[in-house]
Image (cartoon, helix red, strand yellow):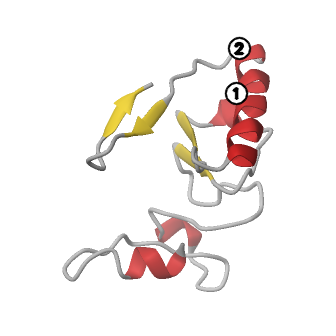
């Protein structure tokens, strides 16, 4: 992910950091495998099946998974049920054939 953010495009760059660089308070995007929010983020992006008990402390949480991978999809459905049962407002978006996003 770190490499992708550096090479998003020839003129694009998403400022970000991690514990390696430090200065979390100066980083608009903080990359971590820990359940922490040292930069006071309002949005939480979870990948690779990651979970967090701190969802309520964020304005929005995005659970990103590969919908073409049957195991990832099954796991995501399990997380969806847990989050919904916990009272979180849920919406589902999927990527269409042209690369855009539409509500599922």
Q: Tell me where residue 11 appears, x and y as whole percent.
A: 19, 79
- Dividing the image into 4 quarters, which one contains the N terminus? bottom right
- Position of 63 relative to 80 (above/below): below
Image point (76%, 54%), residue name:
35
Q: Which mark is residue 69?
A: none
Residue 36 relative to residue 26: left or right: right
In this view, the residue farthest toward the left is 11
Q: Based on the displayed image, in which of its 4 quarters is residue 24 positioned?
A: bottom right
In the picture of the structure, the residue carrying the numbered disc 2 is: 87
Q: Earlier in the sequence, mark 1 or mark 2?
A: 1
> Toward the viewer: 100 or 20?
100
Measured as percent of width and height from the top left, residue 22 is found at 61, 80
Cα separation, mark 1 vs mark 2, equals 11 Å
Q: How many marks?
A: 2
With 89 as the anchor, is 102 left or right in this view? left
Taking the spot 68% from the left edge, 30% from the top edge, the residue there is 56
Q: Is residue 93 left or right of residue 36?
A: left
Callout 2: few (<14), some (14-19), or many (20+) C-alpha neighbours within 10 Å? few
| Of labels 1 and 2, the one closer to you | 1
- Residue 59 screen position, x and y as percent: 53, 33
Residue 1 in the figure: left or right of residue 47: left
Residue 53's place in the image compared with 19, above or below, is above
The answer, for residue 54, to whether it is visible in the render is no
Callout 2: helix, strand or loop?
loop
Callout 1–callout 2 Cβ contact below 8 Å: no
| Local crowd size for mark 1, using a 10 Å CA cut-off: few (<14), some (14–19), many (≥20) | some
At x 64% / y 60%, what residue is drawn?
A: 38
Residue 69 in view of the camera: yes
Tell me the residue that label 1 is attached to.
80
**Residue 31 rendering spot, x and y as whole percentages:** 60, 68
Up-down relation of residue 18 to residue 52 (above or below)? below
On-image quarter of the C terminus: top left
């Amino acid at each position: 992910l770190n490499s992708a953010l550096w090479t998003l495009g020839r003129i694009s760059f998403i400022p970000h950091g991690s514990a390696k660089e430090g200065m979390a308070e100066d980083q608009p995007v903080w990359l971590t495998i820990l359940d922490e929010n040292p930069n006071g983020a309002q949005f939480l992006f979870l990948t690779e099946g990651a979970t967090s008990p701190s969802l309520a402390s964020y304005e929005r949480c995005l659970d990103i998974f590969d919908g073409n991978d049957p195991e990832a999809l099954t796991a995501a459905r399990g997380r969806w049920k847990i989050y919904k049962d916990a009272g979180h407002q849920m919406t589902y978006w999927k990527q269409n054939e042209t690369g855009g996003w539409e509500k599922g």
